[in-house]
Image (tube, rainbow, N blue to C red):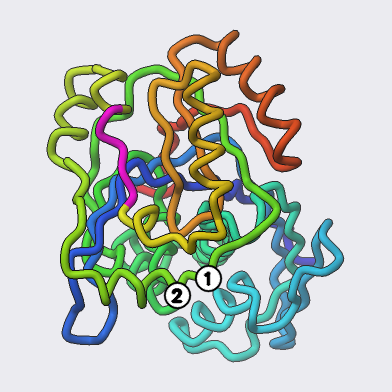
Amino acid sequence: MAETLREKAYAKLNLTLDVLGKLPNGYHDLLMVMESVETGDDVELTPRSDGEIRLNSNLPWLPRDGRNLAVEAVKVFRSAVGDESLGADIFLRKRIPVGAGMAGGSTDAAAVLRALNRWRGLPFDADALRTLGLKIGSDVPYCICGGSRLAGGQGERLTSLPMPPACHVVICKPSFSISTGELFKKIDARSNRIRPDTAGLIAAMERGDVGGMCRRMYNVFEDVLPRNLREVSEMKSRFLDAGALGTVMTGTGSAVFGIFDDYDRAADASVELGEYCRDTFLTKFTDEILIQ
């Protein structure tokens, strides 16, 4: 029986997210400071030699076909190694909420790529594996490695950053999700917009200034949220009332997170905000690099 491979699939958060314009290929040119947090999924994968891909999860409603990026990752990997007999039994223990902007599907796909790459004796280095990941989704290249990164282009141009100063993170995912496509359309139609001070935020990280970092967190998609989604701004207000040094929506939402410099204050905020959001997490950033 084939060996069962296990990988941790960390969630990601955006400290900043900017849309610079359109690339020649039609995708958007992004600039983002991205961080991994300890909250994540567990991925178990057992290779098969009959070409079948079977997926199960603790969430019974999760798609089990090609709509699931973990399934797509197996297809991309086997095409790259030229072995159509390669299949897999995959089990996803999901903790990252779906539709949160936390790269839940992308980080699972990245974990599948890492597991298969390790099983095949590392035919791809980190750069090559990230190139494969981009065929699956824009967040997958980052999720291949994780950590503290500046991401540009579609998300494939990655530069290592210093870890954020020691702090505690509370994440809340409201009951609704947000259409990524609709937000990009609204961004494209907007000529004037506030931009994050990405350089200033990175400088604050470099000098260990958690307050300066938090004051510069910004996500341009918050400016184009539909008017009926007031819950995002209301949640940010609750974070600030609870003592967060800064708060921002991650990705295209709908999860919002706040950063605290005191554990007890963060823990109290997690309890308080958990009354409004079932999916509430108290976590912290992780500096674990998943592949060198």
Which disc, if any, is residue 182? Answer: 2
Residue 225 is marked as: none
- Image coords of residue 152 (percent x, y): 22, 60
x and y percentages locating residue 121 in the rendered image? 49, 63
In this rendering, position of residue 211 left or right of residue 268: left
Contact (Cβ within 8 Å) of mark 1 with mark 2: yes
* Residue drawn at x 26%, y 76% as measured from the top left: 189
Outermost residue, front side: 227
Q: Residue 247 at x, y = what percent?
A: 43, 33
Identify the residue under disc 1: 179
Amino acid type for the residue under numbered disc 2: Glu
Q: Is 213 rendered above or below residue 57?
A: above
Q: Residue at x 52, y 42 (%)?
A: 256
Quadrant the N terminus occupies: bottom right
The span shown in magenta is: 215-219
Q: Nearer the viewer, residue 271 or 236?
A: 236
Give how far apart the Cα atoms at labels 1 and 2 are. 5 Å
Q: Indicate the quadrant where residue 10 lies.
A: top right
